[in-house]
Image (spheres, helix red, strand yellow):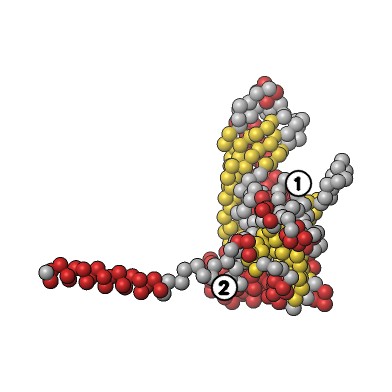
Amino acid sequence: MSCIIRPIKKAITLILLLCLNSIFLTGCWDRTEVNDLALILAAGIDKGEKNNIELSAQIYIPQGSQGGQQSGMSSGSSSNQSFVRSAEGETIADAMARLQEELTRKVFWGQNEVLIIGEKLAKAGISDEIDFWLRHSEPRIRADVFVSKGRAKTVLGAIPELERDAAKQLRKIVKTHIGVEVTVKDLSQMLSGESAPAVLPWVEELPPSLMDSKKKEIPIINGVAIFKEGKMVGRLDDKVTRGILWPRNEIKSGVITIAFDDEDGHISLHLLRSHTELTPSIKDGKWSMHINTNVDLEVIQNTTKVNLFNPKVIKKAEQKVRDEIEQRERLAFSEVHKKLNADIFGFADEFQRKYPQIWKQKKDEWNEIFPEVAVSFETKVKIERTGLATGQGQRGVEH
């Protein structure tokens, strides 16, 4: 009989313990529903009045809640899916608190994918703002960062033609890998580097088409903004920007079009892959940097009469591409290296790695040394595929 009672007692004890433990389970008593949140899609920071910080937020409007109260909140909206709201404060933290006071829902920064910095604030300095963005627990450090011509708030209110909002438009552009892409984390690492240089995509608004006056301005990326010691010191247009992408190992896609002096037409080549190595050298007190770039391409269009099956023609085309790349690099270096004196190419890090003892002695003199660094280029170009030669290219003459 006792053999039967003991298992029953154990089972009852186990059940009581389970019931007792369930009392201490918290469940979802403190959960926050999505309908109770104001989801931030993008943020903009500008200089406000009296040197305050103006924080602008692009806030998502749930599609199922566009009537009633939400339709009233969306006055002045940038699209039918979001609206822009701004608040000023002594700091970003202060502006963020004031922004919350203007909204009926709890602000949620976890969906923020874009951070736009206004031109005026960029020139005054952004180190404190980026430091806050990293310390705050909610904003994404993987958010893409841009600098806008004029006010960041204006860019957030733009209405693109294809994308749902300005934030989506800018993210799609940088994801094409034909320009500079910088996240909050990347920017923080740049600003904490040996020479604290940084480069950010420059955003402008494309004017409405003359053929369609009803269209509104849309944001586009046109070059980069150059920073030194946390402040914007200049900018480069799109053409010069291509020249800084090669040394920085950031060009992933693109098309190069060349022409021969003795031929009509052009040859367009698509970039397959590219890799660049920086080799620093210090000899007899002279600092130099050798930039070695390897580029592989394929022909995607040939409107000339040359025969691309001829090895001599291929060599000639490869030399043209080499000259084109190095010309762009030299143009970029003349702007950044000599005029702006901003080491956005990472030269300081390379010298520090190879010559740690010399760097320790000379790092305080880097601003004087950098403009005097002799730069040399070695570019190896290989055309891997010429495609199916048809038409005039197939019948063309051999040079």
- Where is residue 108 shown, x and y percent of the image? 63, 66
Q: How would you rate the neighbour count of disc 1 (Cα within 10 Å): few for under 14, some for 14-19, many for 20 or more?
A: few
Circle on res. 253: none
The residue beneath circle 1 is 161
- Where is residue 391 shown, x and y percent of the image? 68, 22
Give 275 or 158, whichever is nearer the viewer. Answer: 158
Q: Secondary structure at mark 1?
A: loop
Labels 1 and 2 touching (C-beta < 8 A): no
Between the residue at mark 1 and the residue at mark 2, the CA separation in whole angstroms equals: 54 Å
**For residue 154, above or below residue 209:** below
- Where is residue 5 shown, x and y percent of the image? 17, 70
Displayed quadrant of residue 335: bottom right
- Where is residue 69 shown, x and y percent of the image? 74, 61
Amino acid marked by disc 2: Ile
Q: Residue at x 72, y 45 (%)?
A: 162
Displayed quadrant of residue 371: bottom right
